[in-house]
Image (cartoon, rainbow, N blue to C red):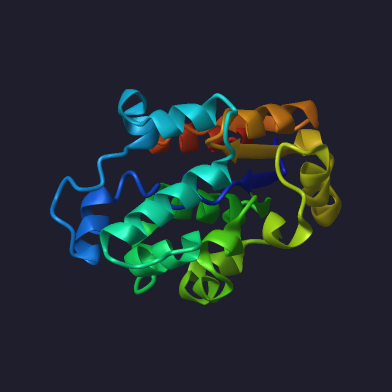
Amino acid sequence: MARALVLDFGGVISRTIFETQPENEHALGLPPGTLGWRGPFDPSGDPLWRAMQAGEISERDYYFARARETGRLVGENWTNLPQFLQRIRGADPQSAIRPEAVAAIQSVKKIGAKLAILSNELDLFYGPDFRAKLPFLADIDLIVDATYTGILKPDPRAYAFVTEGLALAADGCVFVDDQIKNVCGAAAAGYRTIHFDVTRPAESYRAALRHFGL
């Protein structure tokens, strides 16, 4: 059986901003349908997303570009993604958390396995204050955030931070991420891996939990 579940945050634990576009528009006072980009839910209609998937721009480049253009729509100059996320999720970040994620975390904790988050931009995107608004984070044994380490997935060192921090071998860890390049990096580091499908979250979590006999 696996001994640790290692989760990405954005997309895996929290719903993507693509899934919450109606709520985003409402929070910003924009007419329905204004934010037409849908990322993985409509790649053909989102050329910037396709450029990111092709490696032409980084994930950070994509989201910062969307933040800047959305800020202009509401007459504001947003220079970073936290300004965007605080406006659409700051009051209640828990509402954007996937119930499947919370259930999986509880199930893994119950059998005594370890839990970790490995993110490229947890506090960079959301800001450090938001963590206090997410009670389930108390069950996480280790959070590795490249906001502070400066080492981004799929760099092998990012995955090593987790195994060293948990004092576990990589093959005892199940890594879950919605970006295939990060999944491939984890596989190369010796992890068991799940490529998380944001369009089928329940199915992806079931696949991860099977490694724990759940």
Question: Residue visible at 53% across and 60% down?
Answer: 125
Give the percent coordinates (x, y) of residue 141.
69, 61
Q: Is residue 121 above or below residue 173?
A: below
Question: Residue visible at 14% across and 50% down?
Answer: 32
- Does residue 52 appear in the picture of this structure? yes
Give the percent coordinates (x, y) of residue 106.
52, 56
Quarter of the image for residue 193 reads top right
Could you say which is closer to the camera, residue 81 or residue 65? Answer: 65
Could you say which is closer to the camera, residue 32 or residue 198? Answer: 32
| Total numbered labels | 0
Could you say which is closer to the camera, residue 61 or residue 149? Answer: 61
Question: Residue visible at 46% across and 55% down?
Answer: 102
Could you say which is closer to the camera, residue 55 or residue 202? Answer: 55
Give the percent coordinates (x, y) of residue 189.
80, 32
Left or right of 182 in this view: 127: left
Left or right of 83 in this view: 1: right
